[in-house]
Amino acid sequence: MAKVTRRSFVTTVGAASVVPAAALLTATPRAPAEAATAAKTPGDAASGKPVYLFFNADEVLFIEAACERLIPADELGPGALGAAVPNYLDKQLGGAWGAGERLYRSGPWQAGTPSQGYQLPFTPGELFHTCLRAISRDLAANKTPFHEMPADNQDAYLRSLESGAHDLDGVPSGTFFAMLLEMSVEGFFSDPVYGGNRDMVAWRMIGFPGAYADYFEAIDHHGVKFVREPMSLAEDGKGHIHTRQDIPANL
Amino acid sequence: MVQRLKEVDVIVIGVGMVGSIVAKELAAAGYKVVGLERGQTRFTVPEFQSPAIHDELRFDIRKAMMQDNTREPVTFRNLGSQVALPVRRWESFLPGTGLGGSMVHWNGQTYRFQANDFQLATRTRERYGKNFLDADLTIQDWGVTYDDLEPHYDRFEYLLGTSGKAGNIKGRIQPGGDPHESPRSRDYPTPPQKEHFSGAMFRKAASSLGYHPFPQPSSNLSQPYTNPEGMKLNACVFCGFCERYACEHYAKSVPQTVILPVLLANPNFELRTGCQVQRINLDSTKKHATGVSYIDAVGREFEQPASLVISSMFSINNVRMLLLSGIGAPYNPATGQGVVGRNYAYQTMSTVASFFDEDVHINPFMASGASGTLINDFAGDNFDHGGLGFIGGAFIGAVNTNGRPIQYHPVPPGTPNWGKGWKQAVIKHYNHTVMFSLHGSSAAQRQNYLDLDPTYRDAWGQPLLRMTFDFPQNDIKMAAHVTAKAVEIGRAMGAKQVVGSPRKGPYTVTQYQTTHNTGGTVMGDDPKTSVVNRYLQSWDVPNVFVIGASNYPQNASWNPTGTLGALTYWAIDALKNTYLKHPGRLVPA
Amino acid sequence: MNTQRAIPRARCSSSVLLGSIMILAVPCAPAAQTAPQAKPAGTKPAAEAPSAPCEACHGAHGEGMAAAHVPRIAGQSAEYLKKQLDDYADGTRDNPVMTNFAKALSEKQRIKYALQYASMPTLLGPQLKTLNTVQLARGHQLAFQGDERIRVQACNSCHGPDGIGVLHAAPYLAGQSADYIASALKSFQQGTRKNDAGELMRSVAKQLNDADVVAISGYFAQVDISTK
């Protein structure tokens, strides 16, 4: 039988072809029973809660609730909590990044134009503690802490932070919100080595295959759905992901 | 306590691709060369290995391969009337550092400028009349022609092994290549990389509209290759971790894979890392360099005498070095006098997003940094600008370089910034969107320039470089025009929704665009409007040569690297064949 | 309990997806596993389903025969196995025994047997080969890091953590027969095996000397991923 080359059977999407694939893009559908066999982040078995080193107990309540509103769980999959995004924030803010790694910190300081970017003296860690204190005071006036509000009220409060309606002890609330959102997206989509994207749930939701990436043959299959379990740079051959927060931000 | 070292023939400041090539050629010609690099050594093994290198947070977001901005950022303002403030985190452009420089972590997009670009002022006047350009633009001719540089483009492409398809060989148009390109003497050293699905869709759509799509020239190689230096490269596997990352497979053309081992094996060359050059030292006449002063990683200061100094750093750092050293008159925008820092330009980037149904699988994560499909029909002066009110243009292409999710998760307009709606849109569109890159030229104008900041200093106590820049109106108009054309291509691809995002002002340092900073040590025939002559020799200090994109009088529609490689070999010819035999001015002042 | 995790990414239930064109699903337990002993060529079993012709050498459980350089194929990527059969049949991979077998199989049969062996679990443990500590260290270095002097990147970058394989990219090496890995590297070196797209394996193999071939093949053979 004539050899079917890869290119010869790549037809436009939707064309009917009964020639069996010359290459089988073998799918591994994630039946619920298989969830247990995917690569796993250690340390979550018992309570599923991270050990917080940077956030104090009150801050944890706000951060967990706020992150979950930014990236909520829904029918498509886990949200920030399920992906351990607060854990990511905690470890980054408590580590070298939070202490000011890769930030030019000399003065003098002035606000500048939007084109000129961040100009405050705070390190990320200082900024979070300052703003969370201010938010806590702000909400104490309402007598309802953030994590006890109904979701709609939480969203309304977050939107008011986002719009810059609050001054958080000198930090425009929009600056704080932008950093919170940015770090939440990082925590959702970064490699699980950093303590977020637990068990690569976020990668699985979008179909990003992760750190092992050789597509020399697969790239020929135009339009074909590529299905492969995502892979972390920190997993070993037995499916354990070894988290680390001490990877330096310089080569 | 400054230690004075034994004199050498040549100092190369910055051991990136330019510095590596210059050092290799001069060391091979018998000269004693010292290369001073402020960063550290690194090689494919172990520093570039995967899976560790495939870490988006570390390399994309935290910028692990970039210049240490905690010690040496720049300051920035849009307008001279504003106060420049430090760029406290790199975003818009990402200067590299370390052995091999920025080309360790480039995307591999390798272009030639067109003949028209090198005489842009003359040809624009000829074609469109004297009064066509906005009054503030300071467009200039280069002092060299495309024909001068063609053999050097060829040499650089064969050093790299660039993968592509020629469009014009000695005047004969080649099917499948770019018919707009200026003539080349032969085809690329390796054939084009495989086409991505998005490129195939783009190609069909662009052809249907009468345009001329061609494969993006890529220095992520399509197949194994041995270059004229005897260095072997492998085929790129489309891992999708190209720009901001180093290549684990010896498949990207970087100094470590194309030339450094040859350089490092030559005993005429000495590499010193961790050395921050403070200034080029001049004698009492101020017309002759005696060497450089630098501070090493331990904080000790050295004076290294030399007969010849080559400034081959990242472009803006070349400008700063001349300013700190007092070489050439600094540019004053108020008076229009002076040249160092003048004609700073950038790149005018726009995008088009085409959203498809969920049964169209784009797989953006399969990519090299240069496996796109492009048209040059709206680049440079390839189309009639009569009546349009601007010059310049952009290449338009389906340039899918990655699907790394922290930064790449396209959503249609109207999607909320966060919450359930955002998350659902991200999941819905991640694998079903094609992004076009519109890579536009950048005109020079009198208000855009570089100088030294009066307030902020680096960790060594030296003034930071101050950047004053905003997009000329010329380029904003250009961006709007080419974006509208690109949107039509997106529609011809059959997308459900096509969204054009033309570049609008003001320029902001908070959003990544490119690291194509050009100008400031402009080359030319007239010392009143240039810093170096056509051989890249300083008009003021003849034993100083400056090689970098800082020499470009304005920036063209394509990535600057290919032209920089050509200029490097062009300058090396002048150095080896003329200057070093008879040191002195190569061009009368 | 996580033994399933010991196998490379191709799992029991395999589907072929080709956009909206076609989907084939193959159940987990292929019928052919009921006939374990090798049969003489040409003999048809009486009432059972025919055993795969692969069994005679590769074994009913895909365990292979290390001494004869016959690789373990249990749990190997179905796509990879199918490609090797195609390549044996058209000569881009050259082995007199396999060429005959592959040519005799129809397209449908190649897919069937590839899926069959891909679905077999790898609970087979490492295939130990005597290496001294220097050789093991060298093998480990090449697997995880590569070597700049010979310009070779880390094997694991394509072959996965501990060499367990990466679907659609590279087959597993962990627990594979050392002699088989060595013979594969040799055929890439000599150019008798040319079915590596982009010459990715030929480029690497040509840089390895004999000692490195011994070190790498012995290293991967002894990688034990069969237990948690």
Image (cartoon, rainbow, N blue to C red):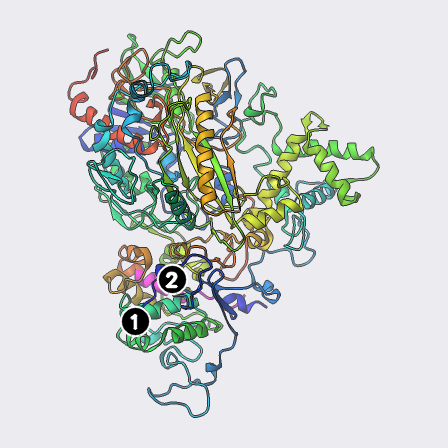
From the viewer's perspective, tell me whether residue C161 is left or right of residue A94: left
Kindly indicate whether the residues beneath marks 2 and 1 are on one polypeptide chain: no
Judge whether residue C156 can be spotted in this image. Answer: no
CA gap, disc 2 to disc 1? 19 Å
**Residue B407 x, y percent position in the rendering:** 53, 41
Q: Quarter of the image holding residue B346? A: top left
Determine contact: label 2, label 1, CB under 8 Å.
Answer: no
The magenta segment: C213-228
Residue B8: x percent and y percent? 24, 24
Residue at 29% in and 42% down: B177
Nearer the observer, C121 or A73: A73
| Residue drawn at (28%, 38%) of the image | B179
Query: Which amino acid type corresponds to the residue marked 2 in the rendered image?
Result: Phe
Q: Residue A4 at x, y = what percent?
A: 34, 66
Secondary structure of the residue carrying numbered label 1? helix
Figure quadrant of the C terminus of chain B: top left
Tell whether A53 sits left or right of B216.
right
> Foreground mark, 2 or 1?
2
- Give residue A116's quadrant in the image: top right
Q: Position of residue B288 (x, y in %)?
A: 27, 13
Circle 2 Cα neighbour tier, 10 Å, few/some/many (<14 / 14–19 / ≥20)? some
Task: Say whether residue C159 is visible.
Answer: yes
Residue C227 colored in magenta in the image: yes
- Quadrant (top left/top right/bottom left/bottom right) for the N terminus of chain B: top left
Residue situated in front as seen by the camera: C191 or B496: B496
Query: Which residue extends farthest bottom?
Result: C46
User: Does residue C186 show up magenta in the picture?
Assistant: no
Mark 1 sits on what residue?
A: C89
| Residue found at the far right of this picture | A143
Kind of residue sitting beneath label 1: Ala
Judging by the rendered image, the residue that carries numbered circle 2 is A9
The chain holding disc 1 is C
